[in-house]
Image: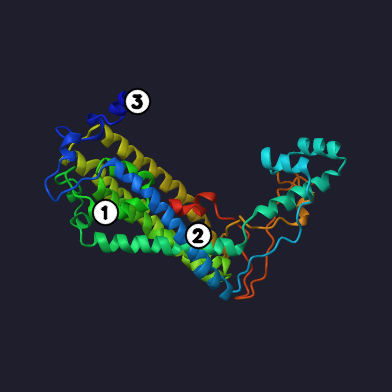
Amino acid sequence: MAALSVWFWNERFWLPHNVTWADLADPAPGVEYPKAGHLLSALPLAVGIFAVRILFERFIASPCAFLLHIHAASVHWRATPNPVLEKVFTSITKCPDSRRLDGLSKQLDWDVRKIQRWFRHRRNQDKPSILTKFCESMWRLIFYLFMFTYGICFLWKCPWMWDTHHCWYNYPYQDFPIMFIHHLATVSLISFSYANNMLRVGSLVMCVHDASDFLLEAAKLTNYAKYQRLCDFLFVLFAVVFFITRLVLYPLWILNTTLFESWEMIGPYPSWWLFNSLLLVLQVLHVIWSYLIAGIAYKALVRGKVSKDDRSDVESSSEEEVDTNGTNNKGVKMVFSPKVENGTNGHAVATITWPQQIRSSSSSSSW
C-alpha cells in the first residue's frame, strides 16, 4: 500500500520541476497550501447541503408550487400486484420485448396486451410528479444562482479575473483559504485542480460553467408552471449564454491560459498534460451539448414551444397498440406524450422531451 501511495503521489507527475511536496507541507507562518486530505471535508458539507435541500423543497419550493397551482398528480391506475411481473420489472427490464411478452403470456395465461398494460401502469407509478420536478428545479435554480453570484463577487476583486497570467505567478505557492469553500461546492473534477493547487484557474472554470445553469432551471420552472412563452424566452436566453460561455469564453479565455500562458510561465509537466486533456474533453462535450441545445432553441423560436422534461409523462392507454420498438401495427413510429391545455396562458404543454444531457445539467452544470 505504501508503495502504491508513493507511486500515485509521484512529485514529478503532479508538480512542476524543482517543486516537491515538502515545499508545500512546510509553508511560512500565516500561509497554508491545499492538501488532498482537505477534500474529505466535502463529505460533511455535502450532508449539510442535502439537509438544506430537503428543508428548502418542503417548506419553500412546495408552497411556491401550490401558489402556481402545481400539485402532485395521483396515479389513476396502479399495477395489480404480481410477483412474476414485478421480478421481471425490477431485475430484468421495464420494457419487455415481444419475445419476452409472449413468454410471460404463456407463463401467466394472460393476454399480451394485458401484460403490456401492467408494465405501462407499473412504469407510471415510478415517475416523479410535476410537483417533485418543480421543487428539484427550484432548488437547483437557487443553488446555481447563489454559486454564480458568489463566484462573480469573489473573482471581481481577484487579479486573475482580468489577467489570466496571474493564475501562474508564483505557482504553486498560492494561498487557499478564501477559495476553500467555493471549491468544495463542486468537488468532482475540481479534486484534480485542488490536489494540484490550480485554484485560480479552477475558479475561472467554475465561473464560466455556472453562468448559464440557473437560466436552464428557470426555464424548466416556467415550463412546469405552464408559462410557455416565458419558458421559451428563458430557454433561448439560456442557449445564448451557454454558447457564449462554453464556445467563446471557455476556449479563448480558459484554454488559452491553461495551454499557452501556463506553458510559457511554468512549462509543461506530466499532470499538466492530464489537466489540459480533461479540459479539452470538456470542450468537446460543450460542442455536443451546444448542438442539442441549438436544436431545442430553434424549435422554440420556430414552433413556439420549448421541450419539457419527460420523466413524469404518463404513458397513455394507446400505447397498448405499440410494440416495444415504438411502432404501431402499421409500422409507423409513435411518440406518446399527451397534451394538456394550459389553464394559465392557453398554450398546450410541449411534447418534445428534454435531452438527458441537458436535464442533468447540471452538468453541464458544473465542470
**Which mark sits nearer the N-terminus, 3 or 2?**
3
Calculate the distance from the C-alpha at mark 3 to the C-alpha at mark 1: 32 Å
- Do the CB atoms of the residues marked 3 and 1 lie less than 8 Å apart? no
List the residue tagged with mark 2.
297
Residue visible at 54% across and 52% down?
Answer: 355
Identify the amino acid type marked 3: Met
Residue 218 relative to residue 7: left or right: right
Which image quadrant is residue 23 in? top left
Which image quadrant is residue 260 in? top left
Residue 270 relative to residue 209: left or right: left
Residue furthest left as drawn:
28
List the residue tagged with mark 3.
1
**Which mark sits nearer the N-terminus, 3 or 1?**
3
In percent of width and height, residue 26 lies at: 15, 40
Above or below residue 6? Residue 290 is: below
Identify the amino acid type marked 2: Ala
Residue 352 visible = yes
- The tally of labels here is 3
Residue 306 visible = no
Give the foreground label among 3 and 2. 3
